[in-house]
Image: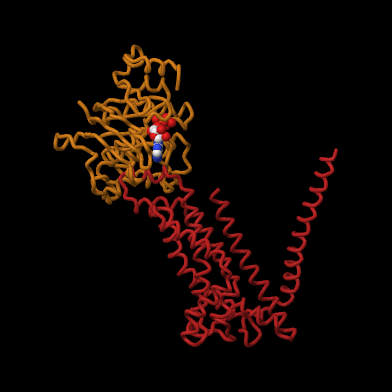
Chain colours: A orange, B red
Amino acid sequence: MNMMEIKNFSFTYAKASKPSLKNINLPIKKNQITALIGPSGCGKSTLLRSLNRIHDLYPGNKYEGEILLYNPQTNEYENILELKKENEFINLRQRVGMIFQKPTPFPMSIFDNVAYGLRLNGIKNKSELETRVEEALKGAALWNEVKDRLKASAMGLSGGQQQRLCIARAVALKPEILLFDEPTSALDPISTGAIEQLVAELKKDVTIAIVTHNMQQASRLSDYTAFMYMGELIEYNKTEKIFLNPDEKLTEDYITGRFG
Amino acid sequence: MNRLIVNKIIIALSVFSALFGIGVLFWILGTLTIKGIVSINWHIFTHDLVEKGIRNLIIGQFIMGILASFIAIPVGVAAGIYLREYNTNKFGEILRNLSDVMMSAPSIVVGIFVYGLLVDPIGHYNGFAGAIALAIMMLPIVISTTDSMLSLVPKELREAGIALGGSKHKIILQIVLRAAKVGITTGILLAFARIIGETAPLLFTSANNQYLTFDLTHQFPSLTVSIYNLANYPDEASINLAWAASFILTIVVLIINLLGRYITRNKG
Ligand SMILES: Nc1ncnc2c1ncn2[C@@H]1O[C@H](COP(=O)(O)OP(=O)(O)OP(=O)(O)O)[C@@H](O)[C@H]1O
Ligand SMILES: [Mg+2]
């Protein structure tokens, strides 16, 4: 089933003369990994950042169409483009988490980093915070490395550890969807391997959308792949199909490295 | 060949200018240290100006400096946050330029301005006016440091906070400010070092006082104004006291500056 359905979606940045995304139709399937690929500037990040409406941090952008998010409580879809109130956004972002290209640890302790979203969520009880933080750090395969220094600053962790901390921070909120924007492009191969393994494991609890420039990563990791080009969705299908036998010539050219 | 000669001349000229500049600096510091140290004794720290000491001057200067900080730091940091985080229109740009202009305003002008505002209408010099004048000197420095230190915080950090469901003001207060804390603190220290050595803003506002006082509604003692006055006296004792006061003031400013650098370095 689809966790999200993006329908006839167009997006125009404030002050831009033409849209960066044109009429996108794309499902994000539940408990699957969907990879977004395409050449630089084709709109992958723009699309991903629409899914939790982080664009709204900057005023003046224009959304058209629908982005439907499945709500397991009501068993219905709601259009996230209709959200207006601050608490609706907060709720959306806690359900749809995001991990960025560069690790973004907050300047505070490891524990406080992971507890940050929980505290925003109103959880104050100390023992509950402790169990949730431990759970999240275990979920992000970081617990063993940091359990003796939870009070230490997160800035002292390695890049790969920081990225897993950011994943733990997002996982702590028990989101339904996690968005990854090139999460390993700033990391060494070993850390990259660890993150990939982690993403693969997270799949059983969360739905994942990941932007990547790394074709091997997309083919190794994802179940579905969407190929984008110049703001349009060119082709979407099962990953094997896209990589072995794409319908579009453009897709094939991109995957075989003929451009981009 | 020709190029080589020109090159040598230019190098010689720059070395000479550098040596000249450093020489003058050491001359000043040297004279200050020699004349200052011989004039320093226990007596001046335990007595007030009326008995040829500087106890009341040090205390007075710090009271006004700290009061000025209590005004300029919260207002300046808040204004800096507004400019960097909330300002999206022309109004903010005007404020930013205004603050930059204020930063280069001659300090005597600030003194005269506060004189017209808080001394003339009241009818007598007062320490409060002195503190306000110093706060006005300090404000644009705090604003511009806060503004530029916040601009160094990557936007990804703000986005990461928002992506966890934080509201904008919470993210600014709990994450962005914390990330810029070291830079802002250093800037504040340097701003304090700057105003603690100011004379002109105090000349027409707090004026001076021979005695130890905590009453900010009347003339208030300060090292800088006293140095200015003492240096004009004919007697040796007054002149020596001026040297001692100058030396101590320089040391204080130096220590605050070093502290600022130390904090920055340790953040590393
Ligand atoms: N803040 C912005 N304002 C205006 N245009 C923007 C903005 N951000 C991106 N764009 C434009 O939107 C288009 C899509 O950019 P986007 O960042 O989504 O590409 P991308 O596929 O993620 O590229 P990359 O692989 O390099 O990250 C580009 O043409 C870009 O120039
Ligand atoms: Mg991108």
Asked whether residue A144 is in view, the answer is: no
Q: Which corner quadrant holds the C terminus of chain A?
A: top left
| Residue A46 higher or lower than B62, as above or below | above
Along the horizontal axis of the image, is A159 left or right of B244?
A: left
**Residue situated in front as seen by the camera: B38 or A91:** A91
Residue drawn at (47%, 26%), measured in percent from left and top? A189
Q: Which corner quadrant holds the N terminus of chain A?
A: top left
| Residue A129 higher or lower than B216, as above or below | above
Query: Disc count in the image?
Result: 0
Residue B256, image x, y percentages: 59, 63
Residue B66, image x, y percentages: 50, 71
Residue drawn at (49%, 65%), measured in percent from left and top? B139
Along the horizontal axis of the image, is A95 left or right of B63?
A: left
Residue drawn at (63%, 71%), measured in percent from left and top? B249
Residue B124, image x, y percentages: 51, 87
| Residue A55 higher or lower than A230, as above or below | below
Q: Quadrant of residue B79?
A: bottom left
Q: Quadrant of residue A142?
A: top left
**Residue situated in front as seen by the camera: B81 or B49:** B81
